Image: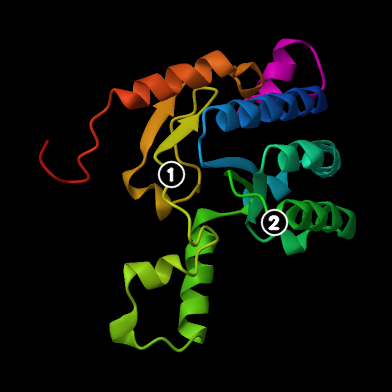
């Protein structure tokens, strides 16, 4: 969800205003995806690399996350959307962990859509974590398969993403779902995330609909 800072700068606003606008967009896109019966939506909210940002900005992002989760809990339940967090969120402060834990618990029974929030997430670290977990489980070498490996990822039990949308003109993967994105389709737009609308979501999905996915085979 790139472009919050640039969106704010273009308007002479503090970066915090951009992050707030971005959170509002996230709320709208979750609602739109639920209406479209999309089964899994993953939002890259905070990467491991984001810790290098100014402390004041990082703290604002955490406060914003707490407010977002508290505000959206009832809506998630009412729309049968289960929250799932991918990433090492146990590294967060107690208030953040509490807000995440409460939302996970309240939505655990929801089964119409899964909302993955990538928090303190790194695709490379996820792969290393899965390797360590697989090794610790004592699985014999001959039984280490792709399926077995998938079972140790944060996204265990979920399908790989069909479509990855990258906003604000960025043209890189940025350590995001590296293993899972092997055959994902990509949609790039110069639109800054706070301006990413339901109409642009539909445009991305229509673009995806017209593609032929061969997965290495012949059309």
Q: Is residue 93 above or below residue 80?
A: below
Work out which residue is located at the far right of the displayed protein and give it. 95
Left or right: residue 81 versus residue 33 is right
Instruction: Name which of mark 1 and mark 2 comes first in the sequence.
Output: 2
In the rendering, at what x and y percent does residue 142 appear? 28, 84
Residue under circle 2?
A: 108
Residue 9 in the magenta stretch? The answer is yes
Looking at the picture, tell me which residue is in the foreground, 64 or 26. Answer: 26
Residue under circle 1?
A: 161
Q: Residue at x 50, y 62 (%)?
A: 156
Looking at the picture, tell me which residue is in the foreground, 106 or 45. Answer: 106
Q: Which residues, given as a range, are shown in magenta?
A: 1-15
In the rendering, at what x and y percent does residue 177 appear? 48, 50
Q: Is residue 57 visible?
A: no
Q: Quadrant of the C terminus?
A: top left
Q: Is residue 186 visible?
A: yes
Q: Secondary structure at mark 1?
A: loop
Marks 1 & 2, CB-CB < 8 Å contact: no
Please say which color scheme the image uses. rainbow
Looking at the picture, tell me which residue is in the foreground, 8 or 86. Answer: 86
What numbered label is drawn on residue 31? none
In the rendering, at what x and y percent does residue 123 appear? 51, 55
Q: Is residue 6 above or below residue 84?
A: above
Q: Residue at x 73, y 17 (%)?
A: 9
> Based on the displayed image, in which of its 4 quarters is residue 3 positioned?
top right
Left or right: residue 116 versus residue 206 is right
Residue 47 in the magenta stretch? The answer is no
Left or right: residue 192 versus residue 145 is right
């Amino acid at each position: 969800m790139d472009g919050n800072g640039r969106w704010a700068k273009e308007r002479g606003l503090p970066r915090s205003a951009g992050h707030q606008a971005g959170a509002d967009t996230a709320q709208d896109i979750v609602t739109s995806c639920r209406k479209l019966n999309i089964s899994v939506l993953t939002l890259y909210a905070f990467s491991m690399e984001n810790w290098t940002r100014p402390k004041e900005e990082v703290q604002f992002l955490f406060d914003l996350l707490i407010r977002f989760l508290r505000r959206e809990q009832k809506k998630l339940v009412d729309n049968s959307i289960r929250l799932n967090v991918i990433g090492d969120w146990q590294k967060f402060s107690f208030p953040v962990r509490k807000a995440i834990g409460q939302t996970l618990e309240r939505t655990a029974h929801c089964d119409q859509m899964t909302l993955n929030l990538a928090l303190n997430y790194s695709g490379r670290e996820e792969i290393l974590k899965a390797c360590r977990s697989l090794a610790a489980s004592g699985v014999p070498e001959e039984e280490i398969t792709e399926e077995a490996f998938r079972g140790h990822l944060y996204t265990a039990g979920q399908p790989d993403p069909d479509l990855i949308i990258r906003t604000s003109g960025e043209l890189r993967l940025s350590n995001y779902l590296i293993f899972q994105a092997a055959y994902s389709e990509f949609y790039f737009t110069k639109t800054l995330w706070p301006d990413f609308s339901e109409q642009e979501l539909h445009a991305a999905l229509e673009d995806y609909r017209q593609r032929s996915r061969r997965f290495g085979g012949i059309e």
